[in-house]
Amino acid sequence: MRLIFLGPPGAGKGTQAAVVSDKLKIPAISTGDILRESVKSNSPIGLKAKSYMEKGELVPDEIVAGIVADRIKKGDALCGFILDGFPRTINQADKLKEQLDKQSIKIDLVIYFETSEPVIISRLSGRRICKNCSANYHVKNIPPKVQGVCDKCGGELYQRVDDKENTIKNRIEVYKKQTASLIDYYKQKGSLRTISGDLDVKEAYKVLTAMFKKEKLL
Ligand code: AP5
């Protein structure tokens, strides 16, 4: 199964991508995670991406499209994948289509996580990430057993630099200006399905599973 998870920051795309990836045994490919790793390791891509990410701006299309083109050719993605946070512009979507055509594959569904702004703000401001394994928590909704410590690996939890109030506001604006037009783009192609991003984690997964069954993907 090949899926795109589309939606505003904080919609829960990464959280559901991790759950679906685990259940269906297909990789969740998050351009945000790949870019954060690149920044951490000071790679040439990381050095280019850092200032855009800190401000909540999009990293240039050719950088992210190249990352995804390389990643989906890897062995673990040959039978399926979830793209989380890519594409984010019409140009990225066109580049993805070109790449998929070359590989003679297609996206089965684009899932749009429709999410209200108060939910986005509360989720992003409360998000905490493990420094070590990148596991994702929320101070109220999905708290770790011990405050500040990852349940999975004992690593230290931190707040993403772009989850500060002003950057959250800018990311929402960037989403509205540069990414939201993909909703119509994929609607016109007939592959868009919508889920409420406001649902809790288990409920959202149930709705997704029902959707996959209805589309005969499961
Ligand atoms: P990226 O990492 O992709 O950030 P984003 O899209 O802004 O998405 P988020 O990770 O903030 O939200 P999410 O929907 O995954 O929510 P999550 O599940 O974590 O991108 C970061 C930056 O990288 C961009 O700003 C840009 O600079 C660059 N970039 C990345 N991709 C790019 C691209 N294609 N082109 C150009 N630049 C790119 O959940 C959020 C919180 O809510 C968590 O704390 C979670 O625990 C909690 N939560 C999740 N679901 C629920 C739920 N159902 N109920 C209650 N709490 C929940």
Image (spheres, helix red, strand yellow):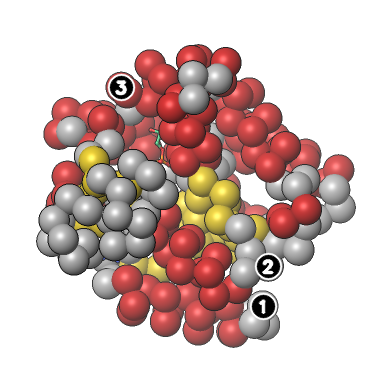
Give the distance between the C-alpha atoms of the residues marked 2 and 1, in whole angstroms. 7 Å
Determine contact: label 2, label 1, CB under 8 Å.
Answer: yes
**185 sits to left or right of 8:** right
Seen from the viewer's position, the closer of residues 161 and 61 is: 161
Q: Which mark is residue 1?
A: 2
In percent of width and height, residue 14 lies at 42, 55
Q: Nearer the viewer, residue 13 or 142?
A: 142
Q: Which amino acid type is shown beneath numbered disc 2?
A: Met
* Kind of residue indicated by mark 3: Lys
**Where, quadrant-wise, is the N terminus in this rendering?**
bottom right
Q: Badge 2 local density, few (<14 within 10 Å), some, or many (20+)?
A: some
The quadrant in which residue 166 appears is top left
Residue at (42, 81) in percent of width and height = 206
Q: Image quadrant of residue 62?
A: top right
Q: On the rendered structure, is 53 left or right of 103?
A: left
Mark 3 neighbour density, 10 Å: few (under 14) some (14–19) many (20 or more): some
> Which of the two discs, 2 and 3, labels the residue nearer the N terminus?
2
User: Disc 3 beta carbon < 8 A from ligand 1?
Assistant: yes
> Which residue sits at x=48%, y=61%?
17
x, y percentage for residue 23?
54, 75
Report the residue at 42% width, 64% height from top: 16
Check disc 3 and report the residue beneath it: 55
* Residue depicted at x 41% and y 49%: 133
Q: Residues within 10 Å of mark 1 (few under 14, many from 20)?
A: few
Q: Position of residue 216 (x, y in %)?
A: 67, 82
Three-letter code for the amino acid on which mark 1 is drawn: Leu
Per the image, the residue denoted by label 1 is 217
Instruction: Specify the quadrant that holds the C terminus.
Output: bottom right
Q: Determine whether the residue tagged by mark 1 lies in a helix, strand or loop.
A: loop
Viewed as shown, does residue 75 lie left or right of 22?
A: right
